[in-house]
Image (spheres, helix red, strand yellow):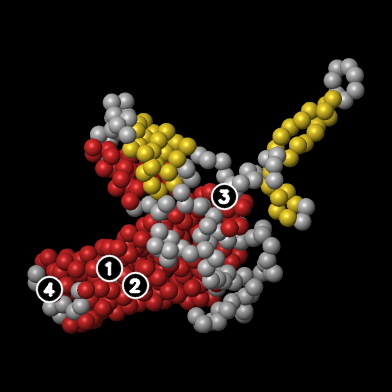
Amino acid sequence: MGPVVVAERRRGPAGPPLPRVVAAMAHELGEGRLEPGIPNGRPQKVLHIDISGAPANLLGRLLVGSYITGQDQVIITARHGLTAAQRKEIHRAVDRILGMTVVGDTPTLVEVQNFIDPGKYELPRLIHRVVQLLKSELEACHTAITQNDPIPLQSIGAAEDEVDRLYLLMVRQLLLSSDNPRIARSIDVQNHHYQLGDRLVAKVLEVTGDLVHGMGQELEANLPRIRRIPRSLLREIARRVGRLEELLGRSMDAFGHLSIVEANATLNAITELLPKDASFGQAICRQVRERKVAVAAQRVVYNIDMALEMLIVVNEVTINRSVEPEPVERSATRVSIGQARSSRGSRSSDTAIAILGPTHPLPFESGA
């Protein structure tokens, strides 16, 4: 649908009212409804970056920022031409971002395009995929500790790279959806408050991925020696890894179904698991004589504890979300403790959010 022409009448100093024509872009929603906006999507956003004299790593971070804030085209120049190091920094950043491609590389400039549609992938499905990746990383850590099998640890690096790419995609979609109702509908996040909470949860998952990746690196570098620490310590570390995987699943299950009972129960379980003192770390120092191994084991335990702290945030967002007003239409707006979930297999109240089957293939499913 083309521009909607609106005629405004204004009275001149003398004579009859004169029409003033104003063109406003709109598109049709169906059933005679219109919504302001560009009929064929967003206006293309172009960013020009002059990196003359830029310090190290700033260019890569600017490219990440341009992606997150929805820039479609980035033109990078320098007064005296781009150096080999700057071109390498550009390609390194582009390689870790979904949908970003170098389309032009000349002696005077590099042109980058972001081709991914910000409304193509539903946010609940992206979150679900990130949780699957995190759980696979934790399973690899648990297998390495309990079965002395280092092979699964080799997959953690690739899984973490995918978590980072999906995190950037989620944030990009959420930021663009805050200004574009059609994108918000497409990714299934229409409440502005939900957009803020979802961005916080996305960041929590990204930080959790960094922590789990750190655990995997420590285990891969020191597994034979960690396996020789006292059995009681090794069993406790394995138990905590397993519990972290379980509580991650429970936290995200409660978040996806908006179950305040499940979120509350998970918070209680996390509180019980988090250390009340430093006794376990002290036991590692006391019983493990080789300093390097003791430090590696302590780092694994520390990362587990920090990941549990991250999950507290997810469950708090779930509980807060259940009591805030939601302006979009739904069957009921109430909190019913009695109808909320009491087990992981049951549905909650009318506020439940279902993770449905795919409408579009995700980038990792299509091989993109």
Q: CA distance from mark 1 to mark 2?
A: 9 Å
Above or below: residue 214 compared with residue 7: below
Residue shown at 52% from the left, 63% from the top: 360
Dot 3 amino acid type: Ser
Q: Position of residue 256 (x, y in %)?
A: 52, 69
Disc 3 or 2, which lies upstream in sequence?
2
Q: Quadrant of the N terminus?
A: top right
The residue carrying pointer 2 sits among few (fewer than 14), some (14 to 19) or many (20 or more) residues within 10 Å by Cα, namely some
Most extreme residue toward the left is: 290
Disc 4 or 2, which lies upstream in sequence?
2
Q: Which mark is residue 155?
A: 1
The image quadrant of residue 134 is bottom left
Give the secondary structure at mark 1.
helix
Q: Which mark is residue 225?
A: 4
Q: CA distance from mark 4 to mark 2?
A: 23 Å
The image quadrant of residue 79 is top left
Between circles 4 and 2, the one closer to the viewer is: 2
The image quadrant of residue 55 is top left
Between circles 1 and 3, the one closer to the viewer is: 1
Give the secondary structure at mark 4.
helix
The reply, left or right, for residue 80 in relation to residue 41 is: left
Q: Which residue is mark 2?
A: 136
Circles 1 and 2, Cβ within 8 Å, touching? The answer is yes
Could you say which is closer to the camera, residue 27 or residue 166?
27
